[in-house]
Amino acid sequence: MQVVNTGNIRVVLFDAVGTLFDTRVPIGEIYENVAKRYGSVASADSIGLAFLNQWNLTETPRDKDSWKAMVLSIFKDVGMVDNFDDFFEEIYEVFQASGEWQCFPETREVLQSLQVTGYHLGVVSNFDDRITGILRALALESFFDSVTTPYSCGYAKPDPRIFEAALTSLEVDAGNVLFVGDQVVEDVRAAEQAGLNAVLILRANKKVPADIQTVSNLSEVLLMLNISTSSA
């Protein structure tokens, strides 16, 4: 297992969805609840599977137009809704609102502990420009010195250049940065390729490569850095 040299860490970067926060219910359920008002009879499970398939097949959506193209492909797979343009406008706004998102229980305490201990914090996410509003709505925005997305820099994980853009914005060397994410390839491997230290947050039991350092929740990042939550 690769062990992070925590003595060199000055900046901690985080993935967003699946790491700091997630949807309150499975994404297929959110789409189903809106789509059925537009005549859809597709199940949450079928929509969720189509979403995952499209996510794996297409480039990461970087703006509203590319999200619209992906959602259109999803509903071509599961059955088209009525008035697709109106449906898309509604579903796009749904995912901009805080009501569909929730922080993991430890998120705010961990971010506060890191911040008051003197670490600079940032987000590197494949989300689009809506992420700023979501972070604000979840009362997380004030913790971060930078937010780097494909929308802001033109690159999406696993392209290591998105991490290089974050390093430039924070004026920090890669070796002084720890990145925390929930995906092996898009997060850990891509961050390592850019020269960062990386750790995988593994909230459920699944097999991962033996050389990847894992934590089961964000609080364990504090333990790695020898920080007590009492410092918050």
Image: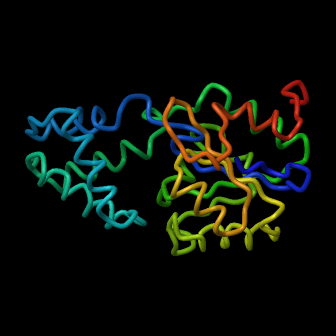
Q: Nearer the viewer, residue 186 or 86?
A: 186
Residue at the (75%, 30%) spot, across then down: 109
169 sits to left or right of 202: right
Q: How many marks?
A: 0
Q: How are the residues colored?
A: rainbow
Q: Nearer the viewer, residue 46 or 210?
A: 210
155 sits to left or right of 40: right
Residue at the (72%, 51%) spot, across then down: 2
Q: Nearer the viewer, residue 92 or 113?
A: 113
Q: Nearer the viewer, residue 47 or 200?
A: 200
Relative vertical location of residue 74 with respect to residue 219 in this rendering, above or below:
below
Q: For the C terminus, which image quadrant?
A: top right
Q: Position of residue 196 (x, y in %)?
A: 72, 62
Q: Position of residue 140 (x, y in %)?
A: 66, 41
Relative vertical location of residue 28 with respect to residue 191 in this rendering, above or below:
above
Q: Position of residue 42 (x, y in %)?
A: 12, 37
Quarter location, residue 217: top right
Q: Position of residue 156 (x, y in %)?
A: 50, 67
85 sits to left or right of 120: left
Relative vertical location of residue 18 with respect to residue 169 in this rendering, above or below:
above
Quarter location, residue 41: top left
